[in-house]
Amino acid sequence: MEASATMLPLSQVPRFFPHKPNRSKLACPPCGPSKPRRTSLPSRLHCQKMYVPGFGEASPEAKAANNLHSFFTYIAVRIVTAQLESYNPEAYEEMMEFLSKNSLNDGDQFCANLMRESSRHNALALRILEVRSAYCKNDFEWDNLKRLAFKMVDESNTRLMRDYVLEISHVEGEGK
Amino acid sequence: MEASATMLPLSQVPRFFPHKPNRSKLACPPCGPSKPRRTSLPSRLHCQKMYVPGFGEASPEAKAANNLHSFFTYIAVRIVTAQLESYNPEAYEEMMEFLSKNSLNDGDQFCANLMRESSRHNALALRILEVRSAYCKNDFEWDNLKRLAFKMVDESNTRLMRDYVLEISHVEGEGK
């Protein structure tokens, strides 16, 4: 099972943003015509929401969804590989070998390559596509994600402010 | 505004996973006691959900939420910096200088450092904390995120399978 650790090198984990920033998009004025969140409607109507610069035509939601898409592919590969390991050692070895040679940075490209490797690999690829769809739609707990994110931001903000205040009051205490 | 492109180097964008994989967790058997999704309950009760290996005590939702937390901090910094640029060039310059010296890989650490830089930086840090909370809870469209992720997985799966079938049928067509 040690192999699982090498199965998906951390360098393969996708990032939120493209490797080259679109500087022309960054130059858009706040609430300008290419306001990220609503490119199809006059931005004036949407200035009740904070302007998020630098996302060009895409919205932060689209960026996050794209990142989650890669995450789901990564998870589907792990699910299928774990299943294979438990009842099909031969296919597991083939999968591990393929994983060692193909990057998961681009999950769709990985699946495309897997489909074309051999008929057996093709069957595995179709299973990965099926699993990532089922995981995304049935297993992944979207409400839990939202709840955890809310909790995380509240707890982090509280901790940061508390630690700062404690630090300051401590310094002042010594000063007296 | 060119500076905005350098504001947040892409190398600072957070990743989904810790830099060191927990190999011992990877070795857990499917549906074993440390099944990621339900560590507090007997895993047998939850085997209707696919086993996702390699997440140790954390769930995929927690990993995704943690990644979104960093994403929201990144967005809050961009929002605040864009606001400063439009009406407080001096604070904007200070912020840009701080950003050039401090990594956003760890958003919370970034905020902690910003709070301690100076009283003016502290005010900016508190605003970033406020903005990331407000963005996460009010502006970020969670339903849209889910909708886009569903759409993305359906479209990607269809495209991958269609392209493969077209390729195969084309090859077979040539073969005749």
Image: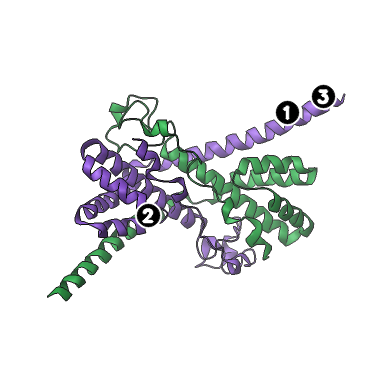
Chain colours: A green, B purple
Query: Which mark, residue B3?
Result: none
Query: Which mark, residue B107?
Result: 2
Mark 2 crowd level (few <14, some 14–19, many ≥20, 10 Å Cα): many
- First reached walking from the N terminus: tag 2 or tag 1: 2
Query: Which mark, residue B173?
Result: 3
Q: Is residue B18 left or right of residue A91?
A: left
- First reached walking from the N terminus: tag 2 or tag 3: 2
**Is the residue under label 3 in contact with that under label 1 (CB below 8 Å)?**
no
- Kind of residue at badge 1: Leu
Name the outermost residue toward the left: A176
- Kind of residue at badge 2: Gly
Query: Which mark, residue B166?
Result: 1
Q: Do callouts 2 and 1 point to residues on the same chain?
A: yes
**Is the residue under label 1 in contact with that under label 2 (CB below 8 Å)?**
no
The nearer-to-camera label among 2 and 1 is 2
Disc 2 to disc 1, C-alpha distance: 46 Å
Residue B97 versus residue A167 in the image, above or below: above
Q: Nearer the viewer, residue B102 or B75?
A: B102
Q: How many marks?
A: 3
The location of residue A23, given as percent across then percent down, is 42, 34
- Check the residue under mark 2 and report the chain it is in: B
The quarter of the picture where the N terminus of chain B appears is: top left
Q: Nearer the viewer, residue B29 or B46?
A: B29
Callout 1: SS: helix
Callout 3: SS: helix
- Kind of residue at badge 3: Gly
The location of residue A5, given as percent across then percent down, is 63, 62
The quadrant where residue A172 appears: bottom left
The location of residue A122, given as percent across then percent down, is 74, 43
- Check the residue under mark 1 and report the chain it is in: B
Q: Residue at x 69, y 52 (%)?
A: A99
**Is the residue under label 3 in contact with that under label 2 (CB below 8 Å)?**
no
